Image (cartoon, grey):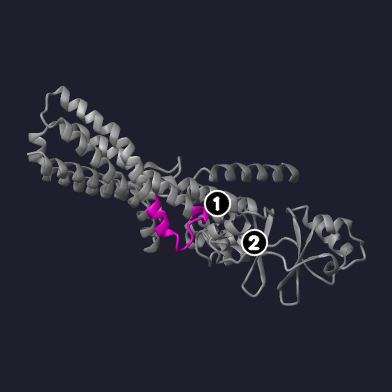
Amino acid sequence: MTIDNAHSATIDMTEALAAEVQLRDARGAAQLLAFSPAPIVAQVLQSLNPAIAQDILDEFPAERRGAVLAAASAQQRAQWLRNDRYAEDTIGRLMEPPTAVFRGTQTIAQTIDVVRELARTTIVTYVFIVDAVGRLCGVVTMRDLLLSAREQKLEEVMLRDPFFLTPETELPEAMKQVVRRHFPVYPVCEADGTLIGQVRGQAMFEEQAYEISAQAGRMVGVDKEERLTTPWIRSLRFRHPWLQLNLLTAFIAAAVVGLFQGTIDRIVILAAFLPVLAGQSGNTGCQALAVALRGMTLGELQPGRERALVFKEGLLGLLNGALVGVVAGIGMYVTARSQSHPAAPLLGVIVFCSMIGSCIVSGISGAMIPLTLRRLGADPATASSIFLTTATDVVSMGLFLSLATVLIR
């Protein structure tokens, strides 16, 4: 095999592994790469979103991780070690080595010669200008680099005081900062302005899209690491604890119904409307929950606006509950009347009032649960649907059966 053929085969292997790795969670990807040559693994990781590459590196045993780091370039190795110091979901985990770093005293001609060589192996979007101690002074775009006179110095054409991100910034906050800028690459600097990396806008949006796609799963207890290719044993470990919690909360709702067993035995028609109330109040709560989570994700829910959110969702619960309560009350009246029940009008009123009360509490719960989880330092989406279902079931069934017990003798 010629050198060119061997190089081509290596590229094909790297691309195939990278495509397969992207379909797996971090642990599954680490297992897939366990027996591949360390240089190939380093190339695969370098082609991935930096946050994904960092998660995979963290899954390797220490010896294997050391071998992969040793096989990477010195610059990439230093960047991976630096990124590992930062928490998940921060800009620091998404950093790449800055590709084109120059001093302001260098000329356009000198810079172009270097950039041409760099462009053979990497994508160069901006030229970063730093001072003697590595602090970011400015940025030169490719357009300015190509159109400026060759004898000009970089400091003469650079954009001064450029926007930059800090490594500790959490991804949602960083997305709010860049949403109106749409730069392909952002420099990452320490608080004193020292340039330590760059992050691609594509990588940020990919990571944010992944976080948003995982939010729906977290609401029902599905870990964000679980993918279609996750082995069933790991999926079972991810999901089963939350199902046990869900079972416990279901027992709570069942216990509430059990307290009114005598009322149900006496007025059997009540049992037919329990799912109606639980389903309607549950949907009301889920609507409020979705709006609250979206507001948190997009940064619309600023400190001090929590009370307004809770009030709004309570008001919507009142209005929606009244509107659907009229229809549900008429349904109860017609059903009870067809069975010649003497308290048919009163049963219709009970359903109407129960629907209003249930929807009010459900709307407030849908807003309060993620707010409470965030205040406790937990992910607002984590199993929020399970807690919400418990609250709506207990309130809707408890209120309905309580009113029936008190008002119908």
Q: Which amino acid type is marked by label 2?
A: Gln
- Which of the labelled discs sits on residue 76, or is there none? 2
Q: Which amino acid type is marked by label 1?
A: Glu
Pick the quarter of the image with the N terminus. top right
Judge left or right: residue 297 versus residue 2.
left
Pick the quarter of the image with the C terminus. top left
Q: Nearer the viewer, residue 208 or 52?
A: 208
> How many residues crowd around disc 2 within 10 Å: few (fewer than 14), some, or many (20 or more)?
some
Element under disc 1 = helix
Percent across and percent down for residue 376 are 36, 63
Q: Nearer the viewer, residue 253 or 126?
A: 253
User: Mark 1 touching mark 2, by CB under 8 A?
Assistant: no
Above/below status of 197 relative to 30? below
Which portion, as a residue range, is magenta? Answer: 297-312
Q: Which residue is mark 1?
A: 207
Place residue 336 in its image quadrant.
top left
Place residue 408 in its image quadrant.
top left
Element under disc 2 = helix
Q: Earlier in the sequence, mark 1 or mark 2?
A: 2
Place residue 116 in its image quadrant.
bottom right
